[in-house]
Amino acid sequence: MSDLDDLYQEVILDHQRNPRNFVRLPNANRQAEGNNPLCGDNVTVYLDMEAGVIRNISFQGDGCAIAKASASMMTSAVKGKTVAEASDIFKRFHQMVMGGKDPCFDLESLGKLAAFSGVSAFPVRVKCASLAWHTLNAAMQEQPGAVVGEIGKETPK
Amino acid sequence: MATGRANGHAALSSSLDVERVRRDFPALSQKVHGYPLVYLDNAATTQKPNVVLDRIRRSYLDECANIHRGVYQLSERATAAHDEAREKVRAFLGAERASELIFVRGATEGVNLVAQSYGRTNVGPGDEVLITAMEHHSNLVPWQMLCQDRGAVLQVAPIDEHGDVIWSEFEKRLGPRTKVVAFTLVSNAIGTVNPAKAMIDAAHAHGAVVLVDAAQAVPHMEIDVKTLDCDFLVFSGHKIYGPTGIGVLYGKQRLLESMPPWQGGGDMIASVTFEKTTYAELPAKFEAGTPDISGAIGLGAALDYVDSLGLAAIEHYENELLAYAESALKGAPGVRLIGTPKRRAAALSFMLDDIHPHDLGTILDRYGIAIRAGHHCAQPAMKHFRVPGTARLSLAFYNKREEIDVLISRLAEARAMFKS
């Protein structure tokens, strides 16, 4: 069952069991909420932004191992990054979980987030992996209304 | 009664030959991810037997014409087959007249029809609609919409820790303002069988009309609308081995006659001028436009198939299998059953340690096992049990003990993978 092992890699299971930055940020100046209505997964992302830099980030919520680990690893990956840098990481992360066949795609550049490459073999789970990222985007762009997962649109070709 | 797994797989003591029955369902013999399909999501939809597929094909091959229109033979044949399907539904539910059966898209549309037509006419400001806390969203949202629209109050009878309606709380919520009581006969999320007759009688004592959601009940038990004395009853064809897109609303004749049509169009009229339209008699009044002709005919074939096995035999076989599955799940490490109702039909909800149901569903799928993972369109019920969702297995008469065994053994692998 190699694709299952690819999906549930140890680093993912570790972040699911012990999610990082899994608190409500007391001095957050931005936040957004995301939902996948068909699953019931939900996440709230809290940001402490200053001059276009993510000074601190945290999340709260409830979801499957993929959704939770993705949110946890996202917070570690974007802390200290600028909005442009975080958006760029999301773009490449999204490409990876959608299973894009871009030959220039550099998996290593995603660092630990490359653990989510196995998601592309599970089309219905793409929305679990990307929910926190869409929510981060909304928080960065100061769209505090609830983000709804892109049902149907997030299916790899 | 099931005698437990230690006794192996001796034939169940009913008259239903599961291996023979399985040959009627070509979909069951396929492989998924290299493993034999173990289909345990029958509460979501059932697989279709050859007789249904053949009948639908024949309806398009030999009798494809619109109904109630043509003066030619093909149309007469289609009309006769469609009428015959309605008569089969009548006999299946024990209704008095075929005109009391309205073809709709499914149980959901049936509830919406009653909420929109009966509800908007008879439910006013301050009136009440009573449902239970275990309802599928399909028997909740239409009533919520009606109440918001009419300034009425949606009352909800709570359930206890087992997943049964708390009788005293149900009774307490019945009163002079209660206009409609709507409840499910069998819970899709937990498997609870509600004491329908007692609930209907109690509602009638307060002058309320009762809608029974029988979507999860009709495949598993004999139902007679006259004995139940329900005012409305809905079910979906695809959950009883028929095609998707067709369902049934039963309503008592005098109520249906008193209700305004909810959709206008062809087929539902007696005469039309620009000034005034006179509506057709039942059931046409509620069936505007060209109906799902082949769907209705396919549903008729599905009901014939169920009758050929006999619901008594089906119920007996499924209850034995359900008891086997329940005892196997209770004995499996890490499993916690969600809901332990007094009487259960066909469905079991559970959690495996703290593994999220979606992760479990993904893992099981890789071994060819199809279960439902999630909130089962019953979010209030999930909230009651303080879980985001559950894993649910739901049985049909073509399932067998070996499939339960496969599921149980894969649960152990899921635990190992999550090291829980």
Image: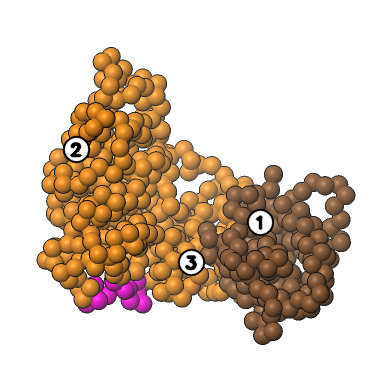
Chain colours: A brown, B orange
Residue B282: numbered disc: 2
Q: Are marks 1 and 2 in contact (CB under 8 Å)?
A: no
- First in sequence, mark 2 or 3: give its number: 2
In front here: B199 or B280? B280
Identified at 14% across, 51% down, the residue is B226
The answer for how far apart the CA atoms under marks 2 and 3 are is 42 Å
Q: Is residue B190 left or right of residue B363?
A: left
Q: Amino acid at mark 2?
A: Leu
The quadrant of the picture occupied by the C terminus of chain B is bottom right
Q: Secondary structure at mark 2?
A: loop
Q: Which residues are magenta?
A: B157-170
Identified at 45% across, 54% down, the residue is B41
Residue B305: quadrant of the picture: top left
Residue B390: numbered disc: 3
Identified at 67% across, 85% down, the residue is A26
The x, y position of residue B172, in whole percent, is 21, 76
The answer for how far apart the CA atoms under marks 1 and 3 are is 20 Å
Q: Are marks 2 and 3 in contact (CB under 8 Å)?
A: no
In the image, are marks 1 and 3 on the same chain? no
The answer for how far apart the CA atoms under marks 1 and 2 are is 48 Å
Q: Amino acid at mark 3?
A: Thr
| Pointer 1 residue | A126
In front here: B399 or B19? B399
The x, y position of residue B237, in whole percent, is 35, 43
The quadrant of the picture occupied by the N terminus of chain B is bottom left
Chain ID of residue with mark 2? B
Residue A105: numbered disc: none
Rendered view: A90 above or below B240:
below
Tag nearer the camera, 2 or 3? 2
Mark 3, residues whose alpha carbon is within 10 Å: few (<14), some, or many (≥20)? Answer: many
Mark 2, residues whose alpha carbon is within 10 Å: few (<14), some, or many (≥20)? Answer: some
- The residue sitting at the top extreme is B72
